[in-house]
Image (tube, rainbow, N blue to C red):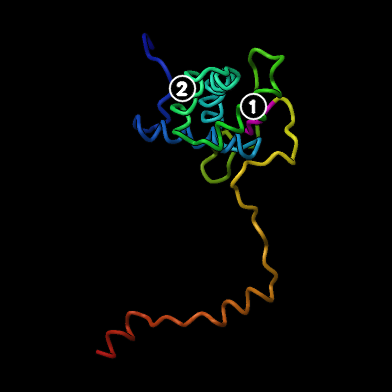
């Protein structure tokens, strides 16, 4: 019988579970959608409603509670209060949806995509984040040529 058992453990200790929760929520806020296992998606969807409702509050105590939950990530909490909370001002809950995906090949884990119910605008980016620039194939080859070659362990032993 499962009496008085609350929450999901996800085969982790308390600290690792809290860190996983914070990182998944941060990734969802930054990217708008994430692909993860179904258990982890259900785990963060329960807390995302509380976090969005907290970000709707304008009080200092609400902001401090939000910082505590997110692990003092100012960029994530600012995006929640400036971009996401106004987007869901007319809703009271149900801010995310979970879409089932095919099982993962390696371990047959049930996969899911969790995303916001309303689509975010692509031009709203977090202040202070860097965009990833792709290098061309020519510049990659030049970088490889200029790198000094490392000596192996066997060569170092022979030189002694």
- Residues in magenta, as a range: 112-116
Q: Residue furthest bottom?
A: 159
Rendering quarter of residue 19: top left
Q: Determine the residue positioned at 43% across, 27% down.
A: 68
- State yes or no: residue 95 in magenta: no
Q: Is residue 40 above or below residue 46?
A: below
> N-terminal of the two: label 2 or label 1?
2
Q: Nearer the viewer, mark 2 or mark 1?
A: 2
Rendering quarter of residue 32: top right
Q: Is residue 160 left or right of residue 22?
A: left
**Circle 2 is placed at which residue position?**
65
Packing grade of label 2 (10 A; few <14, some 14-19, many >=20) is some
- State yes or no: residue 113 in magenta: yes
| Residue 18: image location, x then y, percent | 41, 31
Question: What kind of element bears circle 2?
Answer: helix
Work out whether residue 74 can be spotted: yes
| Residue 160: image location, x then y, percent | 24, 89
Measure the alpha-carbon separation of dots 2 and 1: 26 Å
**Circle 1 is placed at which residue position?**
98
Residue nearest the viewer, comparing 83 with 27:
83
Q: Determine the residue positioned at 72% across, 33% down.
A: 120
Q: Is residue 153 above or below residue 94?
A: below
| Main SS class of the magenta portion in the image | strand
């Amino acid at each position: 019988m499962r009496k008085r058992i609350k929450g999901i453990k996800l085969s982790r200790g308390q600290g690792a579970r809290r860190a996983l929760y914070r990182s998944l929520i941060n990734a969802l806020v930054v990217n708008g959608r994430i692909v993860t296992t179904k258990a982890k998606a259900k785990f963060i969807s329960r807390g995302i409603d509380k976090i969005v409702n907290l970000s709707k509050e304008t009080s200092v105590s609400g902001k401090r509670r939000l910082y505590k939950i997110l692990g003092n990530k100012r960029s994530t909490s600012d995006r929640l209060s400036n971009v996401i909370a106004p987007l869901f001002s007319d809703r009271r809950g149900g801010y995310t949806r979970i879409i089932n995906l095919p099982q993962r090949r390696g371990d047959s884990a049930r996969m899911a995509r969790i995303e916001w119910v309303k689509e975010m605008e692509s031009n709203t980016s977090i202040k202070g984040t860097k965009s990833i620039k792709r290098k061309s194939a020519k510049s990659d080859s030049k970088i490889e040529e200029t790198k000094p070659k490392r000596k192996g362990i066997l060569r170092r032993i022979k030189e002694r």
